[in-house]
Image: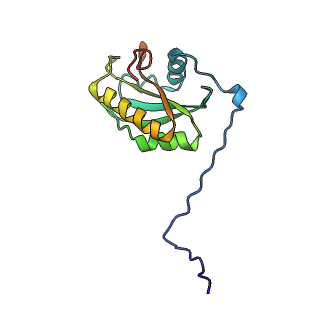
């Protein structure tokens, strides 16, 4: 006797989809950390950059073309939550091969803190498991940026 498949009313069905709105040939390309900085700053609320810490991720194709930008978290004056699951779900759902991390320091200090160095290392390692390269991590302010990649910290 063949067993019938049963449905469970308390189990949700998960559906995955991806709907790009920009042709690949029209996507911006990242060649330098300055290119990434410019894209991040276009999206940043200038009224909050010196007030609250925010973390974002730029999602890229293998050829460094920008798929999109995802706001990961908005925190307080001295920190924000950086959840690797949230970052990599966004990367996986958008089919990103590479990501660039970014956050601001409301103080304007562009030097990475110990927690910044630690989370960058953790996210780089997590990306290796998923074959998603962390290309860079930028710390931004209204006046400029610090690139982990440019400074050899990746």
Residue at x 48% of width, y 70% of height: 10
- Quarter of the picture containing the C terminus is top left
Query: Tag count in the figure?
Result: 0
Name the residue furthest top. 143
- Horizontal arrangement in the rendering, residue 15 relative to residue 25 (left or right): left
Residues 130 and 26: in front is 130
Q: Position of residue 125 (x, y in %)?
A: 40, 35
Q: Quadrant of residue 28?
A: top right
Q: How is the image coloured?
A: rainbow
Q: Quadrant of residue 101?
A: top left
- Horizontal arrangement in the rendering, residue 112 relative to residue 36 (left or right): left
- Quarter of the picture containing the N terminus is bottom right
Residue at x 35% of width, y 32% of height: 119
Q: Position of residue 5 (x, y in %)?
A: 59, 76
Q: Position of residue 37 (x, y in %)?
A: 50, 19
Residue at x 56% of width, y 58% of height: 14
Residue at x 59% of width, y 40% of height: 95
Judge whether 93 appears above or below 142 on screen.
below
Residues 108 and 123: in front is 123
Residues 50 and 78: in front is 78
Q: Position of residue 148 (x, y in %)?
A: 40, 20
């Amino acid at each position: 006797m063949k067993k019938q498949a049963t449905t469970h009313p308390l189990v949700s069905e998960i559906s995955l989809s991806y709907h790009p709105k920009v042709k690949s040939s029209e996507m911006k390309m990242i060649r330098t950390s300055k290119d990434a900085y410019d894209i991040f700053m276009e999206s940043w609320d200038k009224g909050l950059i010196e007030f609250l810490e925010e973390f974002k991720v730029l999602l890229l194709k293998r050829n460094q073309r920008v798929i999109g930008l995802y706001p990961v978290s908005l925190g307080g004056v001295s920190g924000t939550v950086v959840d690797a699951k949230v970052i990599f779900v966004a990367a996986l759902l958008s089919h990103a091969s590479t990501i660039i991390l970014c956050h601001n320091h409301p103080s304007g200090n562009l030097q990475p803190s110990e927690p910044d160095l630690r989370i960058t290392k953790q996210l780089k390692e997590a990306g290796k498991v998923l074959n998603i390269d962390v290309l860079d991590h930028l710390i931004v302010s209204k006046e400029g940026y610090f690139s982990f990649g440019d400074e050899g910290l990746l």
